[in-house]
Image (cartoon, rainbow, N blue to C red):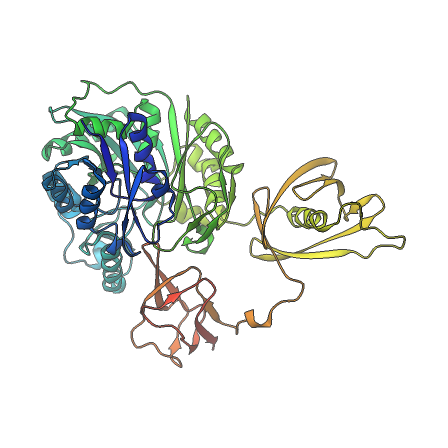
Amino acid sequence: MITSVLVANRGEIACRVFRTCHDLGIRTVAVHSDADANAFHARVADVSVRLPWETPADTYLRGDLIVKAAAAAGADAVHPGYGFLSENAAFARAVQEAGLVWIGPPPEAIEAMASKTRAKQLMGIEPLTDVTEADLPVLVKAAAGGGGRGMRVVRHLADLDAELAAARAEAASAFGDGEVFVEPYVENGRHVEVQILADTHGTIQALGTRDCSLQRRHQKVIEEAPAPGLSAALDEEVRALAVRAARAVDYVGAGTVEFLVADGHAHFLEMNTRLQVEHPVTETVFGIDLVAEQIRIAEGHPLGADPPPARGHAVEARLYAEDPACDWSPQTGTLHRLSVPGAVRLDTGYTDGDDIGVHYDPMLAKVVAHAPTRAEALRRLASALERAEIHGPVTNRDLLVRSLRHPEFTAARMDTGFYDRHLPGLTEPRPDPHAPLAAALADARARSRPGFGGWRNVPSQAQTKRYVMAGKEFEARYRHTRQGLEADGVRVVHADARLVILDVDGVERKYEVTRYGDQVYVNTTALTALPRFPDPATQHAPGSLLAPMPGTVVRVADGLTAGAPVKAGEPLLWLEAMKMQHKVTAPVTGTLTSLPVSPGQQVEPGMLLAVVQQA
């Protein structure tokens, strides 16, 4: 019987596994990098072991260090989570050779399916080798790992070599394996998958379907179970193919078989030999704990002959620290507050006050709603996200809420091209025009001394305060009077340092105000208070390209130097942040007048990368 589990992972999935272990009375062991020394997963585990250094390659991808950590902490089993070494057969063998229980599939099954090229060959599918114009568009894909890393859509043959190089670099950084392959890219299909559970006694259960079609950069954003709108025949087909794939490799444990569904046909994509990020939607629909099932299977217990009956519908949204309107750029900083109301499940690896760093995936949490029907589940999840307090870096919260309410999604007519078609509308700023005034009134009350109303016997001059909201500057104007604070166009019903109530056209609206230095949150709207007098040192020359995020300059375009002519859209350099590479391009056609960075250099948000003077 397993008594102590080390999770060879970090963040949300480590916390998720620890929660089940604690419920089962199993002792928990965390590993952490130096960057994660104070991370939530390290704090909630019973004990933790340091993996010296910060980058994934030196810590969470070092199987030898993790096996030593398990021995040092007295663990008798290892759970890999997802990502990192979860689909690494050599690591699974090392765990077993150390006398530890591996809570996962046999290494041979991992080898057969973890490489997407070998998995496709096993299912009778060969990758493309000599790509021609007739094959376009194609998808460059990492043979190992997942999560959209090492994946590129290529629509022009001239771009293929560069995208292959970028995909290899990204895959090597994220998974320690730079192998990539090329396959046909199916436009506007649906991403459907089947959850598999298999025991050591020959029983394989197919726990229904999931739809994961809403994706950005080939990484899932919203998932649901069961997949809506599948015909009975197609539902049966994908579940049968999933069981066939599992039997072909003598699979044991939890796994997922993924398909692209188009024109009523299912195209095999891959089998993920691990737990999926979206496993909670299957758990809530079937009323089971998949991590507990993984542990029971690893202990040798048999599954029942049939899975439990499914009930209702579940939807999961991945909350990321990223800006969808700025090429999905990841964000860093302090997460001051994360609170999601309502009857939803929140799986997270962060708590209030934690820092979001540059080394790892920017997912903050998974929010899951379950209800008797799909429509009810969508409404419940959208409402919970809309009312959530998320104070800190920019997130994709507004995108999630709008996606869940989009008519194409509510009608279950979505596909993997959803964000390609609708992103501009989904990310259009819709700030509350009265948020700056509410912030200014709350600030005025916070700064006023008790017993002093601020009014005078002579008419008061209007007070002004400037804020940046949704990328634009706004000015709030108010006055101190005998009756209190006044503003043009609205009636101030109440104002204190935390709550402002404004009567707008006969409707009293409440504004909860929270401040963290210059950062102000009015309900769910984020603002930045501006100083009265701008600092000249922060001004930049026209055409300046600033780092949108902290990261590392991994390469500069070949032969590019100051004084070189550049064309609009031409790649200048590449940044790596949170395991993804981000291309920085010339905004206009002109001359590169400055290039103050070089490969290997660390940059912070707002740091000057280049200056392009328009021709």
Q: In this figure, what is the number of numbered marks?
A: 0
Camera-side residue of 434 and 578: 578
Name above or below for residue 216 compared with residue 210: below
Left or right: where does residue 513 sit relative to residue 98? right
Q: Is residue 123 visible?
A: no
Residue 535, relative to residue 468: is it above or below? Answer: below
Residue, x 38% and y 41% (percent of image)?
349
| Front-most of residues 609 and 121 | 609
Residue 530's quadrant in the figure?
bottom right
Q: Residue at x 24, y 39 (%)?
A: 6
Which residue occupies the foreground of this view, 601 or 431? 601
Report if residue 575 is visible in the image: yes
Q: From the viewer's perspective, tell me whether residue 468 is left or right of residue 597.
A: right
Instruction: Say which residue appears at 48% left-offset and 64% top-offset.
Output: 606
134 or 393, nearer to the observer: 393
Q: Please state the horizontal and vertical placement of residue 488, each as a whole percent of the image.
A: 77, 49
Seen from this angle, which residue lies furthest right? Answer: 457
Whole-percent x, y for residue 226 in the image: 33, 28
The x, y position of residue 611, in whole percent, is 45, 74
Could you tell me which quadrant the N terminus lies in? top left
Horizontal side, residue 187 vs residue 604: left or right: left
Which residue is at 26% across, 34% downward?
A: 193
Quadrant in the rendering for residue 347: top left
**Residue pushed farthest bottom?**
563
Q: Position of residue 306 (x, y in %)?
A: 21, 18
